[in-house]
Image (cartoon, rainbow, N blue to C red):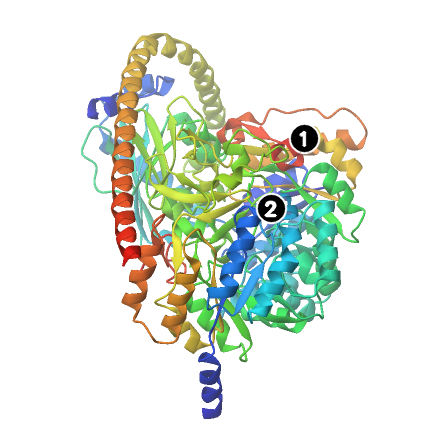
Amino acid sequence: MSSQVMNSQATSSKAKLTLGPVLYNWPAEQRRDFYFQIAEEAPVDVVYIGEVTCSKRAPFLTPFIPEICERLERAGKEVVISTLSLVMSKRERKELHEIVQDSPWTLEANDLSAIGLLEGREHIVGPFVNVYNEDTLDYFYRNGAQRIVLPCELSGKAIERLLLSNNSKEIEIQAFGRVPLALSARCYHARSHGLSKDGCLYVCEQDPDGMNVETLDGEPFLAVNGTQTMSYTVNNLLDEVNYLNKLGVTHFRLWPQQVDMVRVAETYRARLDGKVTNEEGQDVLSNLVDFAPFANGFYHDVEGNKLVE
Amino acid sequence: MHDKNALLKMPPFTPMLFAGFMMRPVPAFFLKPVAKRVLARMKKLYPEIFSRLAVLENTKFLITPTDLQYCFYLSVEEGQTYIDVGVNDAEHPEFQAAISGPMIDLLKLLEGRVDGDALFFSRALNIEGDTEAVLTLRNAVDSADVSLVDILGGPVPFMKPGFDKLFSKIGSFFEYLEQDFETVHRSILLPITRHMDEIDKELDKSEDRMKKMDKELVRIKASLRKKQQSNHKFVGGMQ
Amino acid sequence: MELVCPAGTPASLRAALDAGADVVYVGFRDETNARNFPGLNFSPEELEESLEKAHDMGRQVYVAINTYPQAGNLEPWYRAVDTAARIGVDAVILADIGLLDYAKRQHPELRRHLSVQASASNPEAINFYHSAFDVQRVVLPRVLTVHEIAELIKEIDVETEVFAFGGMCVMAEGRCSLSSYATGKSPNMNGVCSPASHVEYEQRRGKLVSRLGEFTINSFPNEEAAGYPTLCKGRFVGHTGEPSYLFEEPTSLNVMMLLPELIQAGVKALKIEGRQRGKAYVYQVVSGYRKAIDAAMKGEPVPLMDMGNITEGTRSTAGAYEKNWR
């Protein structure tokens, strides 16, 4: 019993920070430069890269991926390629088959199609796959998952119960950034510009942190990112990460936003290492994020848009 | 604003409205035993409705047929359902949820001859307060094949055949009348509604103007803050 | 072509059978199904009686157990599957991987369908569910065009069921947390979307204003048809600064026009949405679709019925089945 406790404490000290894939349509060169900077400066252990949101954006980033991955690996980062979250067309399926066959890097499966193709092979189950309970968690580990990223709406209590049966396997939660709430076949960015998805003119590029959506009363509510709908609020679990780490969460994901992500990563690292207090860390983050308020409601089992202090 | 709401709550012009005028001399307390009798019959005929209502624990509904002077207080207390009758313009006891609409629609709803959502979508039905309680009531009532003929024909069974016929005649009579009244209704109310619409539009316009001004203010504040921040950053950078 | 119809109560089930449903799908009165609404759904006893009635008429009953079991509290979902198996329902409709695995291990003979909530939108995902859990049918998410469905059917070994009429998710089903973001309750966890407990209607200066949690979802002028305050069908303000239906109008799905194409595509079953609707709705829609399917199967022109009165916002759309919807 006591050796188990020792074990979990041993893993807890090795809490890892990950950088999730860029969910927005940032220009390819900007993404490349962003990753170069992350490679050089950010204290993250794992970097996920790849187009998750819209397959129409993928061709721009793809040519840069080998160069970016090489740079990240040289800097000692674990590189993971994230796959598309909603797979429908022939082209999307073909690309998925190719990536599963050819990728020298580990893959993050964001749809059951990828999970099926990766059966028996080591992979990561991404946050767009529904994992709500211990049975499903077990099934995916048996299927070959080395790590599972939990969906955004799971509460701290649910995470705690999941970890009871987890046997020290790797678990990742979404700690920072606007959370992806919904996927659709329809592109709301195009729709809001009076365009169709096919003729979208890539208008999503205009909103690198998502397009704010307000209610009729002028209250900010959501953010649109192409076919994806995001929270308006910025999820921030800085205050919760150490507790979660003690419970057995091994990886903490930061979603890239148009803020100084190096500073964000430094702040989370410092908090995990006990080098700053929560208040000091929150101060830094508040100064970095000026486009929307923080929230942690999902974690606290209330409305996701709420901030529980 | 209050006047406006009062106008909106004007009864719909239906045959029931006239029936209501005729019934005006009948005080509500004469209707109470009838309502209670109907509820008792329903409990006996359709126990499934009341088992589904029990989840509400303690909830009071105000049900207002908008074309009658009477209203019904339906309450669920510790698993038991009670009914009382009141007068529309009187002060109502406390309630958690309110449903209002023309009597014909409410009766159709009771018999499951019309879909509650459909009535609501078409704006015939209004609900206020605890939406979940209203939904529970609707689902509970819809779970049984309620028949007004069975309910009303029940207490004196030997009268049933005659009553049955009379009732169905009354039903179709009202449905015919309903259509004719709709025409008259429109012609009487059109000038008033037009005028009200104009006032509404004016109010909307000024509300929009206010909102725009609000937003402008927020923008100005934000840009001011950003300027201050970038000054800070610049100074910080120099250090 | 099988006509699969909704019932939230035994009375609705009878209405569906009377109107010509081949199959009625229902849920238990708890959080194990995605229409966990107050006063709705079936007790095991009601299900038993209803099943007997359906079987006597030569029809079938499916049971939806299509929410995601809660961590540390799997018992209600296990029990729902066990009860469905004991009563002898014709199929269970499941979404969660863990629960599919449980059902396959404990009740291998119980027919399993994949719920739309699992959002299996391509052959690879569907074939995975088939090989891993021996799923016999998949309810397709409302993200595919008729053409894509036809292509998909060629590449899978299981039957397909598609939504024909009723409420329409504009997001990929089972992959949406908008409701819990606004209210704390979600379809996946609680079996509710934009739950009535968080809905408020308010009459404000000649308009019906609907609110969900703390957010205003819509405002209907008095002469305009209203809709549910489902948050993806509300009026919002995007980059233009003008209010619009940014995600979708309040509207219902209706594919009657596309029936011949869906039959051609090889679709096995048509599903009507609306376990939360009244029996009047069930009877009207099921009768309409019964006539339409019978005509279409004989190659006759499909009699188009006016469903205006029962649709949301009194409007309907072929939704994602037509490519220009995207």
- Residue C36, visible in the rendered structure: no
Residue sitting at the far left:
B91
Residue sitting at the far bottom:
A2
Instruction: Decide if residue B106 is on the left or right side of residue C85.
Output: left
- Identify the disc placed on residue B231: none
Q: Residue at x 33, y 45 (%)?
A: C214
- Rendering quarter of residue C225: top left
Instruction: Decide if residue C118 is on the left or right side of residue C200.
Output: right
| Image quadrant where one finds the N terminus of chain B | top left
* Front position among marks 2 and 1: 2
Instruction: Decide if residue A90 is on the left or right side of residue B60.
Output: right
Q: CA distance from mark 2 to mark 1?
A: 31 Å
Mark 2 lies on a secondary structure that is loop
| Chain bearing mark 2 | A
Nearest to the observer: residue A41 or residue A15: A41
| Image quadrant where one finds the C terminus of chain B | bottom left
Q: Mark 1 is on which residue type?
A: Met
Residue located beneath label 2 in the image: A54
Residue located beneath label 1 in the image: C256
Nearest to the observer: residue C13 or residue C164: C164
Label 2 Cα neighbours within 10 Å, binned few <14 / some 14-19 / many ≥20: many
Residue sitting at the far front:
B238
